[in-house]
Each structure stands twice: as structure tokens, then as C-alpha cells.
Amino acid sequence: MPKTRRSVDAPQALSPNLTYLPYLTHPPGLAGFLHQAPFVASMPPGGRVFNIQRFAVHDGPGLRTTVFLKGCPASCPWCHNPESQSPYPELIRSPERCVECGSCVEVCPEGLCPDGMDPERCAGCFECVEACPTGARRMVGEWVTVDDALADVESDRVFYETSAGGVTFSGGEPLSQPRFLQSLLQESRSRGLSTCVDTCGFAPRRTLLGIAPLVDLFLYDLKTMDEERHLAYTGMALSPILGNLAALAAVHDNIWIRIPIVPGFTDDEAALERAAEMLAGMRGVRRVSLLPYHRQGSAKFARLGREYLLPDVMPPGADRMEALAEIFRRRGLDTHIGGEA
């Protein structure tokens, strides 16, 4: 599929041609995403993680440690963790730390240093990371074992016990590394840790339902109920996500829905009315969180050498968020604005 980059317009008139999807370096959908990942067979048992965040308060109840698994089948232009999208290690550049010592120039085989980086030409050798004395260049996407990941999680056990917290596995999409995720969940359970999985639901149903008994809480993301918009702006079909949610809600009784509110993209009131009607009929859905769009990810796009495609989109105001929350509250759904428990 050709790769082009352009500004994303609000979807008044969507084209069925999806070649403009931002940063889509794989064919759209799960099959294309998995096509990129056979390299994992040659690695030691484990998975690829791009961050482990301690004292998280937006990823489930209590104080939590969130383990962010790398790789996602979606390519949302509003993503606040764009380094999560590719399953491969990536180079992040922080120009404010650069002292122009020339160390990266000496080792770069493609001649890309020090002025910038071109994702199309970067060989991914990360020689510049090793050579940089100030941390102006770093690699994101470390391969870790289950014990490695949970060592960081267990260090804060006392805080989980006093706050009813635990561990959350997020991404990216954690179900894109199903064996690693299952092993993490099994070991967490064996250690008495409360478990949470944050997912977009785009995965084989047997994979999702297979981990359900190991998960105390699901954070389930819904972007929009508009099939055409969903495909155009995430690269994923909507129907498998909704089907998986219905199947999960039939067997699991603790699901929190999270909906990003991005003006002009996911804030269509008719689509939100349909979402509220559907969710009100699912017995496993316990709450809905509407997450107002923010621009905190824009700097990360720049550091990855990518263009941020929503430069003119502004966060929704408090009155707008309250009005949208009322759509769900009228259906009897426990509805919150923001991600805090």
C-alpha cells in the first residue's frame, strides 16, 4: 500500500480510498499488522514494551503500574502514544538535549544525523543511540521477559494493597502480543495482583475471551459508532470490535468503556446516541468514561520524525463534555469525564 501523509480533515465527505491513512506502514487491519511481526520468533521468550509507568491513576481503580506493550493495529491520528503503534523498536529524537558533538554523525550509516531522521531511510541500527552522550537519541521498544516486567510492578505492591490498585496492561494494543499478555496475566494472578487490560477490542475473539478469566477489569475503547469514519481514521473495521464487545460483556461483568472525544471526528451526537443505546443493554458494562481530546502527543510525533495531522483541532470545552455525558446518563449509564477512577 502506498504511504502518503497529509493533514486530516473533519470527515464531512470520506473517500473509500484509504491510502491516505496516517503512518500506515502495514496493510490495514489485523492481518496486515501481524504480517509485520514474525521477527518475534527469533527472540527469547517475552515481549516488546515501550514504557512502564508507576503510580498511574487513569488506568483503572487505585494506584496502578501500567505496562505498555508495543504494537497496535490502529493508526489514530490523535494517538497520544504514537510510539506505541509500530511493533518494532523506534528512534526518538530530543533536539533540546543535543549538544552538536557530532558523535551520531560519525556512526550513522545513512548520513541522517544530526539534522533529523527519515523513517523511510533509517536502518534501525540504533548506533546513534549508543554514541549519543546526552540522551538526545533513544530507542523505544525494549524486549523484556515476564519476570523483568513484573519486577517493576511488584516494587509498588504496598501501594496497590492500600488503594485497591494493581497492574494494567495497555499499549498500543496488548492483545497484539497475545502469548506475552497471557503469560503476564497468569503470573500476575499467581502473585496476587489485581489485573486490568486496556484494549481496543480488535483481535481474534478466541484470544480476547481466552484471557477474560485472568482479567479483573477491562478498559474497552470505542472510537465512534460510524463504520465509515472508524475505518478511515483508525484503519480498523468497526464490526469486529462491536462483536467482540458483545461477546465479552456476556461472560465478563466488569467492563469500563472509554470513548475519546475528538472534535470533528468522534463527537457526533447521533453516533454517541447509538453507542449509549447499545451499551445500556450490555450487562457487563459498568461505567463509561468520555476522554476529552488533548494535544500532548503532538510533540511525540515530532520526535519520531512524523507529522502531527491535527494541528488545528482544539480540546472540547467543559460544557460540551457535560452535554455529551448526558447522552449516556439518560440511559442509566454511570458516566465520567476523564480517565480517573
Image: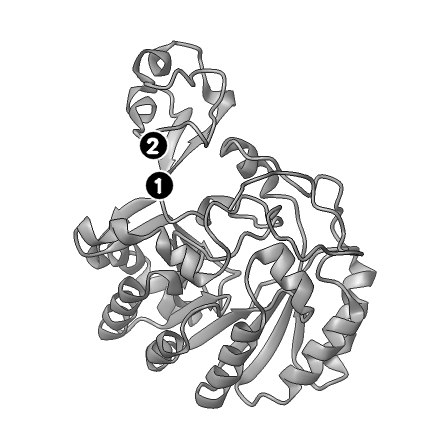
At 66% from the left and 68% from the top, the residue drawn is 227
Question: Circle 1 sits in a helix, a strand or a loop, which is it?
Answer: loop
Colour setup of the view: one colour
Q: What residue type is labelled 1?
A: Pro
* Residue 146 screen position, x and y as percent: 23, 59
Q: What residue type is labelled 2?
A: Gly
**Mark 1 touches mark 2? (CB < 8 Å):** yes
Can you tell which mark lies on residue 89?
A: 1
Crowd band around label 1 with a 10 angstrom C-alpha radius: few (<14), some (14–19), many (20+): many
| Residue 6 picture quarter | top right
At 49% from the left and 63% from the top, the residue drawn is 59
* Residue 189 screen position, x and y as percent: 27, 74
Query: Given this view, does label 1 or label 2 mark the residue nearer the observer?
Result: 2
As measured in the structure, the alpha-carbon distance from the residue carrying label 1 to the one carrying label 2 is 8 Å
Q: Would residue 139 be found to the left or right of residue 81 on screen?
A: left
Can you tell which mark lies on residue 124?
A: 2
At 42% from the left and 47% from the top, the residue drawn is 86
**Camera sees residue 234:** yes
**Camera sees residue 260:** no
Closer-to-camera residue (41/268): 41
Q: Would residue 65 be found to the left or right of residue 20 on screen?
A: left
Can you tell which mark lies on residue 237?
A: none
Closer-to-camera residue (204/192): 204
Question: Circle 2 sits in a helix, a strand or a loop, which is it?
Answer: loop
Q: Up-down: is 167 above or below 288? A: above
* Residue 101 screen position, x and y as percent: 39, 9
* Residue 178 screen position, x and y as percent: 32, 66
Crowd band around label 2 with a 10 angstrom C-alpha radius: few (<14), some (14–19), many (20+): few
Q: Would residue 102 be found to the left or right of residue 325 on screen?
A: left
At 18% from the left and 56% from the top, the residue drawn is 45
Label located before the other in sequence (1 or 2): 1
